[in-house]
Amino acid sequence: MSATSSRKSYERGSNAFLQFNDVKEFTDYALSTAPPVPTYYPRMKKINAKGPAIIGNLPRVAALPAKEFKKAVEDGEGVLIDTRSMLGFAADTSPAR
């Protein structure tokens, strides 16, 4: 059995967290075996609660004609990112037969 897969029967017998029938016993075990809280958590809690800085209006990116865009990508001056949904790019676009 690899580390990336398992079976319920194996886990029931070997996973310490699955050995409890009582919620309180499980909770006590989970809390007593948890690793210590990292020292940066209190600081990160405050930063996350504050939220990100508002950037405001970003400058608009000028549109490029198709030939200039193609050249920019080929020259490494631009990156093409396909933002279509999975169905948008996975659809069969081959000509009808």
Image (cartoon, grey):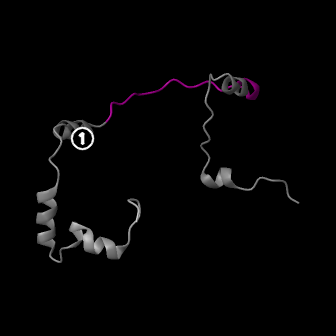
Instruction: Please give the residue where the numbered disc 1 appears in the rendered image.
Output: 49
Magenta highlight range: 52-68
x, y (%) of residue 18? 24, 71
Against 18, is 63 above or below?
Answer: above
In the picture, which quadrant includes the N terminus?
bottom left
Residue that sits furthest to the right in the current view: 97
x, y (%) of residue 26? 16, 69
**Residue at the image point whose x is 19% and y is 41% from the top:** 41
**Residue at the image point whose x is 66% and y is 52% from the top:** 88
* Residue 75 occupies quadrant: top right
**Residue at the image point whose x is 21% and y is 41% from the top:** 45
x, y (%) of residue 27? 14, 66
**Residue at the image point whose x is 13% and y is 64% from the top:** 29
x, y (%) of residue 76? 63, 23
> Left or right of 70: which side holds 9?
left
For the image, the number of numbered tags is 1
* Residue 47 occupies quadrant: top left
Against 12, is 41 above or below?
Answer: above
Residue that sits furthest to the front in the current view: 1
> Left or right of 68: which side holds 38?
left
Within 10 angstroms of label 1, few (less than 14), some, or many (20 or more) residues? few
> Helix, strand, or loop for circle 1?
helix
In the picture, which quadrant includes the C terminus?
bottom right
* Residue 31 occupies quadrant: bottom left
* Residue 59 within the segment the image draws in magenta: yes
As rendered, which of 28 and 52 lies closer to the eye?
28
What amino acid type is highlighted by mark number 1? Ala
Q: Magenta: predominant secondary structure element?
A: loop
* Residue 76 within the segment the image draws in magenta: no
As rendered, which of 1 and 34 lies closer to the eye?
1
As rendered, which of 43 and 52 lies closer to the eye?
43
